[in-house]
Image: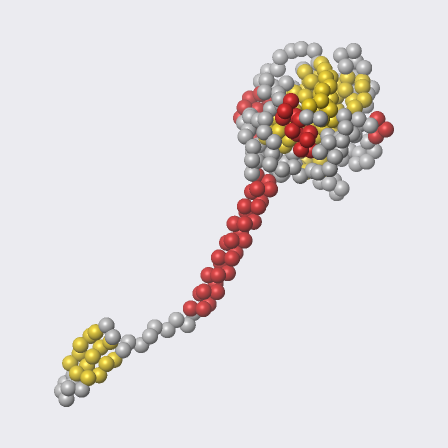
Amino acid sequence: MRKKFPTKKGIIFVDDDSNVIVERPASIQRPHKWRDIIIGVLVSITLCIMVLGGWRLYNYYYNIGVPISVTPEENIQKLAARHKGGKPTITLSSDSILGVALNMYRLENLQAEISLVEPDTTDTSVWLYSRSADHTSTNEYLGSLVMNGKELASDVSRLGYCAMANGNIVLGISISDKVKDYVEERGGSFFRQFILVSDGVLPVKFHLHGKVERRALARTSDDHLYYIETRHPETLWDFADALREYGFADAIYITGGKCHSFYRTPDGKPHNIGDDTQHPYKKYQEIVPWIIFKAR
């Protein structure tokens, strides 16, 4: 008869003749061990790629990197507010700061809209007009674009915006579509462009390079709206830095360089802005979105 003695090394059996037999437990087989390791490595690599891709996407599109001076909710309140009466006025002033020469057009008691038809100086209701959003060579708009309540494009890759509704105009910086949706519901206009200045701070980097004539829409901290052009070719950084130094709270880029436009003085006379040999703008007719400022 054998006696059994369990130990850490196995089970010891002792028979009647005092013979000792040690039985060790069979090792546990794991036939899928390497397969599990390979799957785990592949999952880890996939997750790392997804995290890296998401981080780069966030930094490229959504990481504003600057403070915000006005929230979407505050801008919606401004758009909904009843505007004060007054005569439409555009006042031109010129100055130079940080070596950048600027023409600044202060816009007062004007409303605005987006149109695909370039206006003419004979249209006395127009006080100023300019390019607004960009488009590709295949006629696709870059950034969100709403024209008279109709959405033509929806994209927040450009975080600066200009919104127009109820006879009011606001500038802002946001990834939110709240203002765009509000404008669309009320038959207004809206477009997005690059940030130049947000709450008096420049973005970390700019996506446009080289030295060309530059333009912008900008607002002061007390909500005065300006259309601004450089008198000489400038880098986008130098232009934005001059706007910041001059004291503008927010500014967004306006495409077009020295593309022709005009403004009207209180005596009703139109005055050219940019290269008048480019008028009318024949390339991409009824594709280019123009922002048109009119009397309320």
* Residue drawn where x is 61% and y is 31% of the image: 202
In this figure, which colouring scheme has been used for the structure? secondary structure
Residue 102 image point, x, y percent:
72, 23
* Residue drawn where x is 46% and y is 67% of the image: 35
Q: Quadrant of residue 29?
A: bottom left
Image quadrant holding the N terminus, namely bottom left
Residue at the far front: name it.
Answer: 99
Q: Nearer the viewer, residue 220 or 241?
A: 241
Q: Quadrant of residue 274?
A: top right
Give left or right: position of 84 versus 25: right
Q: Quadrant of residue 268?
A: top right
Residue at the far bottom: name it.
Answer: 17
Residue 290 image point, x, y percent:
74, 29
Residue 109 image point, x, y percent:
67, 15
Q: Nearer the viewer, residue 188 or 7?
A: 7
Image quadrant holding the C terminus, namely top right
Residue 76 visible in rendering: no
Q: Is residue 257 above or below residue 120?
A: below
Give left or right: position of 62 versus 284: left
Residue 284 visible in rendering: yes
* Residue drawn where x is 71% and y is 26% of the image: 99
* Residue drawn where x is 73% and y is 40% of the image: 136
Residue 128 image point, x, y percent:
75, 21
Q: Nearer the viewer, residue 152 or 98?
A: 98
Q: Count numbered badges in the picture.
A: 0
